Image: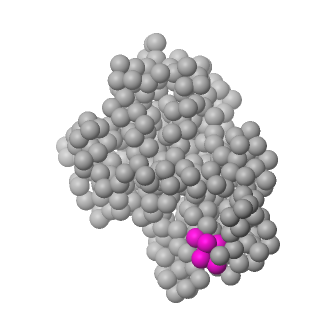
Amino acid sequence: MTIIEQLQHAKSIFWRNPHKVNWQEAQKKLHITPELIDEAEQRLLRFAPYFQQIEPMTKETNGLIESPIYHAKNLEKTKVAAKEALWLKRDDLLPIAGSIKARGGIHEVLKIAEQVATEHKIIDENRDYTQFNDDVFKNLFSQFEVVVGSTGNLGLSIGIMSAKLGFHVTVHMSHDAKQWKKDLLREKGATVVEHAGDYGKAVEKGRKEAQNNAQAFFIDDENSTALFSGYAVAARRLEKQLNEQGITVSEEQPLAVYLPCGVGGGPGGVAYGLKTVFGDAVHCYFVEPVQSPCMLLGMATGKHHKISVQDIGLSNLTAADGLAVGKASKFVGELMMPILDGILTVSDDELYEEIFHLYTSESIKVEPSAIAGVMGPLRSQQQAKTHLVWLTGGGMVPEIEWEKYKVIGEKQK
Ligand SMILES: *Cc1c(COP(=O)(O)O)cnc(C)c1O
C-alpha cells in the first residue's frame, strides 16, 4: 500500500522519515542558522521587564514567557518502556495565551512593535522596555493594525498581545474555530471575522485584507520565520530545565520529543532548536490528526505545501482545532526532511481517550490538540532514557468546555 493509500484510510499510522541524516550532514542542507534563534532570544530578553510589569505570572521567570517540565510518574507506567522516564512540557501553563502560540505568536507581535517604535524613533535608549507600556507607544500603535488567520490559538495569542500593546487587531477565523475562543478574543478587544472555509481560507482572507492596508502587518502562519524562531527559543531554555532536574542527554542517553503538528511552525521551530542544542542525542517526532496529516503528506510525497489533505480525499475535520490544517507551511517541511525521525497520526477518539487518561492519572486538563504527543513513545517504538511529550495548550479552555471533552473521553474507555 502506498503512503497516500494508507493516509486515505484515515487510521492511525506511523511513518518513519527515510530522509533523516545525522546532524552534521543535516546542517549542510539547511538554509537557516542558529543566529535566527539568538535574535529571537535577545528580543524576548529586552521585553522581559515589560512582561514583569504587565503580567504577574512572569515574575517567577524574570519576565520570560516560559512553562515548567513535569515528571509524569503515573502516566509513565503505561506510556513508556520500563526504566524509561516520561516528562511533560507544560505549555498549557504558558502565561498570556495558555498554549505554545504564546512563544511564536507573541514573539512576532513584539518584533512588529519594536520595528514600528524604532522607525518612529520613540525608544529611549536609557530606559528598559517597560516604556512600551507608556501612552506614547500605545498612541503610536493605535494607528496600525495586526492581521492574522487562525483556527484559534494563534488568534488568541496574537489578539491578546496586540491589543495589550495598543494595536488594532483583526483575527480571521475558520468555521471550525471554537465559539469560546471567538468570544474571548472579542472580549479582549480584537475584531473577529468568521469565514465559511477552513484554516487555509481564513489565512488567505487575512493576507488579502492586509495587502490593501498600508498600515497593516500580516502575520503569516504559513511562512513566518519570526514565529518559527520564537518557538525555537524554547529548546535552549529546555536544556537548562533538564539540567536542573539532573537529566543528562547524550547519544547513549537520548531524549525523544513528541510534538503535535498543525501548519508546522510550532513543532518545527522547537525541533530545529532542539537539534541545535542536542544534535544526534535528540529524536523528534510530530503527531497529526488522521484527517489532517498535512506535514506527513507533504514530506512523504516531497510536495510539501503544494499538496493538501483535501487533494487525497480527507476532510481536514478534527476535534483538534489547533491541528486542523490542510496544507503544511511553505518552508518547515523542507527544513524537517533531514532532521525529523518520523510522524504519527491519531484519531479524535484516541485524543479524547487520552485527555481523560491524563486527567485521571496526573490531574492535568488539556485540549484535544495538546494531548496528541502522548501516543508518541509507544507508536514510534523509540528507545530513549527520557521521553518528553509536549503538552501544547489548554490553559484557557473554560471549565464547561473541558467537561465535555472528559465525558466523551470517558466513553471511549
Ligand atoms: C497551533 C497548535 C499546535 C501546532 O502548531 P503549528 O505551528 O500549527 O504546527 C499544536 N498544539 C496546539 C494546542 C496549537 O494551538
Q: Left or right of 201: which side holds 363? A: right
On the rendered structure, is 6 left or right of 236? Answer: left
The percent coordinates of residue 150 (x first, y second) are 55, 64
Tell me if residue 152 can be seen.
no
Quarter where residue 17 is shown: top left
Query: Residue 383: horizontal and vertical position, in percent?
Result: 37, 22
Q: Can residue 226 be seen in this view?
A: yes
Q: Residue at x 43, y 20 (%)?
A: 385
Quadrant, the N terminus: top left
Q: Main secondary structure of the magenta part?
A: helix
Q: In this view, does 149 lie above or below 245?
A: below
Q: Which residue is drawn at 40% across and 45% down?
A: 272
Counting from the top left corner in percent of width and height, residue 140 is at 71, 78
Residue 117 falls within the magenta-colored stretch = yes
- Using the image, determine if residue 146 lies above or below residue 348: below
Q: In the displayed structure, does residue 398 sit left or right of residue 356? A: right
Q: Is residue 112 magenta?
A: no
Looking at the image, which residue is at 46% across and 17% down?
84
Please say which color scheme the image uses. Answer: one colour
Q: Residue furthest left?
A: 1
Q: What stretch is highlighted in magenta?
A: 115-120
Q: From the viewer's perspective, tell me whether residue 172 is left or right of residue 277.
A: right
Q: Position of residue 317 (x, y in %)?
A: 47, 56
Viewer-nearest residue: 355 or 32: 32
Q: In which quarter of the image is the C terminus?
A: top right
- Name the residue rendered at 53%, 54% in the picture: 40
- Which of 284/278 is in front? 278
